């Protein structure tokens, strides 16, 4: 089993930045694709960003393109989501997820096997 723990959320003013982290432990391989997802109160969960196991492929939701960057450090078993120019619509609980997938990035939540409990991100106007 793999465990994922998110950290680095918090409260930020509009226009500010945060960089949540997703740390993996347990049965870790280097062939896991990782995604970040978010869910705001009363809204459905949405995909935000996804990265392939080797970091060569990254995909983003249209609403975060140019503002968010997903990256990973496989030596540290950690994936990051750098969020710049944040706006109140970014307020949500952010979850990371992982799936054993040796090629490409995965976008759909149902394709992921392991999930973290999430970290709250709140952007004030």
Image: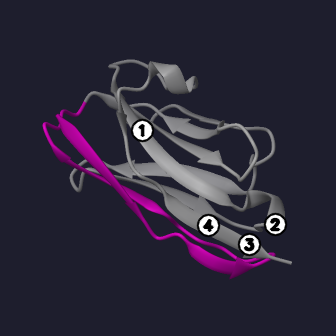
Contact? badges 4 and 2 (CB < 8 Å): no
As drawn, which residue projects farthest toward the left? 27
Q: Which residue is mark 2?
A: 88
**Residue at 23% from the left image edge and 56% from the top image edge:** 76
Q: Residue furthest right?
A: 125
| Labels 4 & 3 near each other (Cβ < 8 A) | yes
Query: Which label belongs to residue 22?
Result: none
Mark closer to the chain start, 4 or 2: 2
**Residue that numbered label 4 is attached to:** 121
Cβ atoms under marks 4 and 1 closer than 8 Å: no
Please indicate whether residue 105 sits to the left or right of residue 77 in the image: right
State whether residue 106 appears in this view.
no
Q: Residue at image x 39%, y 18%?
A: 103
Report which residue position mark 1 lands on: 97
Q: How is the image coloured?
A: one colour
Q: Residues within 10 Å of mark 3 (few under 14, many from 20)?
A: many
Q: Can residue 25 be seen in the rendering of this structure?
A: yes
Q: Secondary structure at mark 3?
A: strand
Secondary structure under the numbered disc 2 in the rendered image: helix
Q: Is residue 99 above or below residue 58?
A: above
Q: CA distance from mark 2 to mark 1?
A: 23 Å
Residue in the foreground of this view, choosing between 66 and 44: 44
Q: Which residue is rendered at x = 81% and y = 58% of the image?
A: 89
The residue labelled by disc 3 is 123
Callout 4 secondary element: strand
Start-end of magenta stretch: 1-30
């Amino acid at each position: 089993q793999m465990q994922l723990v998110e950290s680095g959320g918090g409260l930020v003013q509009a226009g500010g930045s945060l960089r949540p982290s997703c740390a993996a432990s347990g049965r870790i391989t280097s062939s896991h694709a990782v995604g970040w997802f978010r869910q705001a109160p009363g809204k459905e969960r949405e995909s935000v960003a996804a990265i392939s196991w080797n970091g060569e492929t990254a995909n983003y939701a249209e609403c975060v393109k140019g503002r968010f960057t997903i990256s990973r450090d496989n030596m540290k078993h950690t994936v990051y989501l750098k969020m710049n120019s944040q706006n109140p619509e970014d307020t949500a609980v952010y979850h990371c997820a992982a799936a054993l997938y040796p090629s490409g990035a995965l976008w759909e939540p149902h394709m992921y096997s392991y999930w973290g409990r999430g970290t709250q991100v709140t952007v004030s106007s």
